[in-house]
Image (cartoon, rainbow, N blue to C red):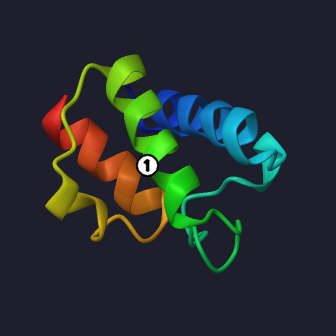
Amino acid sequence: MATQTEVLEGLAEIVNEIAGIPTEDVELDKSFTDDLDVDSLSMVEVVVAAEERFGVKIPDDEVKNLKTVGDAVNYIIENA
């Protein structure tokens, strides 16, 4: 099972590839939309990439609950 740090680093790489956000700006308390400027289309791409990378399924109705990077990290750890 991945650690919080490993998941955070992986998510930071994904957000960097998709939205061009520097990996060091992707922190647990950052909001995807407010702080990182990830729009809904990019968020779908982030979710798909995270599912592939971490072997986890994130249902569409769960995506709306993933407001911060920390929310996503916790979801992946709990469901991987």
Q: Amino acid at mark 1?
A: Val
The residue under label 1 is: 44
Per the image, label 1 sits on a secondary structure element best described as: helix
Q: Nearer the viewer, residue 60 or 66?
A: 60
Left or right: 33, with 71 as reference point: right
The quarter of the picture where the N terminus appears is: top left
Farthest front residue? Answer: 41
Left or right: 44, with 29 as reference point: left
Number of numbered markers: 1
Residue located 35% across and 64% down the image: 66
Establish if 41 lies above or below 73. Answer: below
The location of residue 47, given as percent across then percent down, is: 40, 42
Residue 39 sits in which quadrant? bottom right
Establish if 64 lies above or below 59. Answer: below
Residue located 26% across and 19% down the image: 55
The quarter of the picture where the C terminus appears is: top left
Residue located 72% across and 32% down the image: 17
Establish if 13 lies above or below 43. Answer: above
Farthest bottom residue? Answer: 34
Residue located 18% across and 34% down the image: 57
The location of residue 23, given as percent across then percent down, is: 77, 41
The location of residue 45, given as percent across then percent down, is: 50, 41
- CA neighbours of label 1 inside 10 A, class few (<14), some (14 to 19), many (20+): some
Q: Nearer the viewer, residue 31 or 3?
A: 31
